[in-house]
Amino acid sequence: MLKFPAAPVVSRMAPTPSGFLHLGNAVNFTLTWLLTRRAHGILHLRIDDLDRARFRPTYLENIFRTLDWLGLDYDHGPTGPEDFEHSFSQQYRLPEYEAVLQAAHAAHPELFYACHCSRTELARQVLPAGRYAGTCRPAGLPFAAADTAWRAAVPAGANAAFSDLAQGDMRIWVAQDPGDFVVRKKDGVAAYQVASVVDDVRLGVNLIVRGLDLLTSTAAQIWLAPYLSEQGGFTQTRFLHHDLLRDEDGHKLSKSTQAGTQRGILEEAATPQVVYQAVARLLGLPLAAGESLEGLQNVIAGGI
Ligand SMILES: [Zn+2]
């Protein structure tokens, strides 16, 4: 059973416009909204468009339509696609992410290493859990070379320990999972782990609600943040990793495993009740609580 985060709460909904939002996204946003509103907290809409290659305007528009359909409001963030593109895109932040990476690299010369492995090479050398074998680690390749990614040199035994509001006390061995993760991609753009930390710290986020599929991202970020200038406060963030929803066949629902024909929850569900009921199931509430957003709010107001 999850613990409710105590006030003050600053949280965020962080969709990615690289696909239509599915049930899992909708449940995550609804849960984040409920926990933040229960604590009279501040909620940001923080759209993650770092990967512009997979960006589509229709996916961006789908984010706003889905939030509207769910009845979820927020206190800060873009009011619509145009506002997002004009003032909120992560593309405006690329110099900031780069400065954080360069400063960390200068202050901790052993923290990162350059990796020029191709996709094919990476596919060949993958270890369990998709971990990188560390082939380039002893090579001392030049950081400034073209077509070169930067990876964190995660020391053996490095771990991230935190108390999770849903899962209890956690300790993740970062060297095992995710291992030497990418901090700067081959195109010179900061990786998700870096941009996500920098953005959350800038917004003053102190509660992150995620699915369990992002647990190793959390571990990587908690381990990395103290090395990134002015990002150390990230380790004070509270986390809630909720269980993943499954489809009728018991498969995890995630954007990457879905077929290209996937139209998203907005097209698939007649009403948002489907989402509210999934939240009720996730929280172990009677299904009746999932009749409406207000129903969920009323039930959790007094504690579960
Ligand atoms: Zn490599």
Image (cartoon, rainbow, N blue to C red):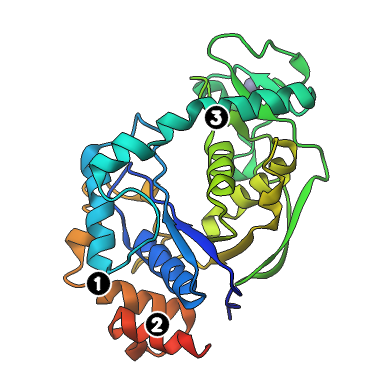
Rendering quarter of residue 164: bottom right
Q: Pointer 2: residues within 10 angstroms few (<14), some, or many (20+)?
A: some
Image position of 34 with respect to 148: above or below: below
Relative to 278, does residue 120 appear above or below in the rendering? above
Label 3 beta carbon within 8 A of ligand 1: no
Q: Secondary structure at mark 1?
A: loop
Q: Along the horizontal axis of the image, is 182 left or right of 65?
A: right
Q: Which residue is mark 2?
A: 297
The numbered dot on residue 272 is: 1
Q: Residues within 10 Å of mark 3 (few under 14, many from 20)?
A: some
Q: Position of residue 239 (x, y in %)?
A: 61, 62
Q: Is residue 250 visible?
A: no
The span from disc 2 to disc 1 (Cα, nearest Å) is 15 Å
Q: Amino acid at mark 1?
A: Pro
For the question of whether residue 230 can be seen, the reply is yes
Tell me which residue sits at (75%, 21%) in the image. Answer: 106
Question: Viewer-proximal residue, 5 or 260?
Answer: 5
- The residue that mark 3 highlights is 96
Cα–Cα span, label 2 and label 3? 38 Å
